[in-house]
Amino acid sequence: MPEQRDDQPRESARPSEEPPEKRSGWFAKFLAAIEWLGNCLPHPVTLFALFALAIAVGSAIAAAAGLEVADPRPNAPEGAVFTAKSLLDGDGIRWICQHLVTNFTGFAPLGTVLVALLGVGVAEKSGLLSAAIRGMVLSAPPHFVTVVVVFAGVVSNTASEMGYVVLIPLAMSLFHMLGRHPLVGMAAAFAGVSGGYSANILIGTVDPLLAGITQEAAQLIDPAYEVNPACNWYFMIISTFLITGLGWFVTAKIIEPRMGRYDIAHADDTVDHNPKLERLTQDEKRGLAFAGLGVLAVALVLVIAAGPRWATGALTEWIPGWGVLRNPDPAATGPEQLRPLLKSVVTFIFVFFVIPGVIYGRVVGTIRRDVDVINAMADAMRSMGLYIVLVFFAAQAVEFFKYSNLGSIMAVLGAEALISMNLDNPLVFLPFILMCAFVNLMLGSASAQWAATAPIFVPMLMTVGYSPEVIQAAYRIGDSTTNTITPLMSYFGLILAIAARYQRNLGIGTMISLMLPYALIFITGWIVLFYAWVFLFGLPVGPGSPTHYPGG
């Protein structure tokens, strides 16, 4: 008898005769309460508008009370203090009227995200992203399918909704075709796409977005501080393999044995009883090959442009003596040598998506003229309408916080509280990560949550002595791991509706109970990795990312 693979269903794993909804009834009720509480919150845009209003009122109260704290920064003049400034007195109102527009246009994440999305829009519209994900999954050997699905899910979050819209339905169809339970495929893909949202081997649009918010918050303490979009890249890369391994383990050892064999009688009439998975056409394969060559060409140009002073002899005739994207200052050392490169990450995201996207589109026929590229970029911008509205109010809240000095005051008071609790050490990140994971249950947007909390926690933990880059890495762990168990996640309803085709009367409790093991094991494993990577081995979370803030 052949040996049974770990990621295949076991004969003894039979589903209970009791409906799944009943078996997880207590958890369904718990999640129903969470959903009800989450629905009590206003729309995120309204939330930020109310937040800005609350800051204005709070600043007036704090100023009237004469609230101030000593400036703890080592380079601060002797006797310097942070004093609360009112936004509702004459000076405050004039400042609001004069800076309402510049608060919005100067908000760091806005331009970076829009520029990066222009490139992603071309790659998505041409069909490159969809073909690449399908090719990655369908080319895997059967016993590697689970691993590849989880890995593809993690990588797909470079282009956000592509994983939700393409990979998750594809994974259900793939598992159905292989005679495995479709909901197991859904769980594996969902875990990678959403639970591993902050892990990736690539830099995506969310990275400059979060880095911009972190920079805005860090500048409450240090106005000259800069956070580059690749600041968590090293930690993201190693996290990709952690999430892939943990995702395979949970799927093979917990989820698939629990689900057992799939009974097609549970499916609705729209499910094909003899499914045929659509494989890549020859044109798509050829397009991917040429797009890959385009990526290699761009990467080669980047290596030359950022390369060290290695060209000698005849090579100096066509390779510069120093890379144009390196710091021309000969005294620069370490990360300072690559500062121009790190500050150009958004440009590279744009180029790395546009060029392969155009090449692929030309090969398969989805892009024939310049207007097709323009339309792809325009479609990407149309999808950002709500984000732009949200950013307007988020920017006001952040700048109100900065003007009023409330952020700096709360940071000092919070740091003093942490120190008094003996939490001015690495253990402070444990409650911080768990808090972020809990808040994520009710405020699912990574940018919305971070924009609201970064002005408080980044300065506070900087004052304790940790860098904004490490703080952001810790935040991303909490923000990712509970994505799969909150009904308030924007794609949760879509996934539930698609999964219900394969399992009629599928309830939220069943869905959540299916994904809960991923959330629990992901957050545990990720916290262990964080402490080992940052504090045990002393490794940086990204290029140019120190562990400690020198001014802390």
Image: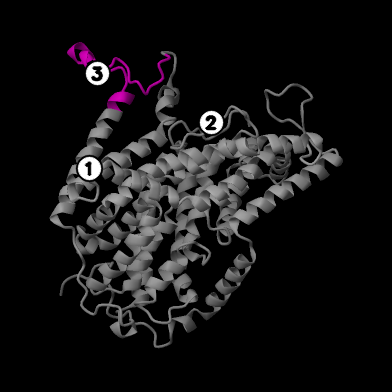
Disc 2: which residue = 226
The x and y percentages for residue 104 are 59, 40
Q: Nearer the viewer, residue 381 or 184?
A: 381
Residue that appears at 44% across and 51% down: 382
**C-alpha separation, residue under disc 1 versus residue under disc 2:** 35 Å
Disc 3 residue crowd, few under 14, some 14–19, many 20+, Cα 10 Å: some
Residue that appears at 34% across and 47% down: 375
Q: Are marks 1 and 2 in contact (CB under 8 Å)?
A: no
Q: Nearer the viewer, residue 78 or 341?
A: 341
User: Nearer the N terminus, badge 3 or badge 1?
Assistant: 3
Disc 3: which residue = 319
User: Nearer the N terminus, badge 1 or badge 2?
Assistant: 2
Q: Total of numbered circles in the picture?
A: 3
Relative side of 351 to 36, left or right: left
Q: Secondary structure at mark 3?
A: loop
Q: Which mark is residue 359?
A: 1
The x and y percentages for residue 409 are 73, 38
User: Nearer the N terminus, badge 3 or badge 2?
Assistant: 2
Image: 299 above or below 438: above
Q: Nearer the viewer, residue 21 or 425?
A: 21
Looking at the rendering, the stretch of residues picked out in magenta corresponds to: 303-329
Q: Callout 1, which amino acid?
A: Ile
Q: Callout 2, which amino acid?
A: Glu
Q: Secondary structure at mark 1?
A: helix
Q: Is residue 427 visible?
A: no
**C-alpha separation, residue under disc 3 versus residue under disc 1:** 26 Å
Q: Is residue 80 visible?
A: yes
Relative side of 23 to 455, left or right: left
Magenta segment: does it hold 17? no
Q: Nearer the viewer, mark 3 or mark 1?
A: 1
Disc 1 residue crowd, few under 14, some 14–19, many 20+, Cα 10 Å: many
Image: 527 above or below 409: below
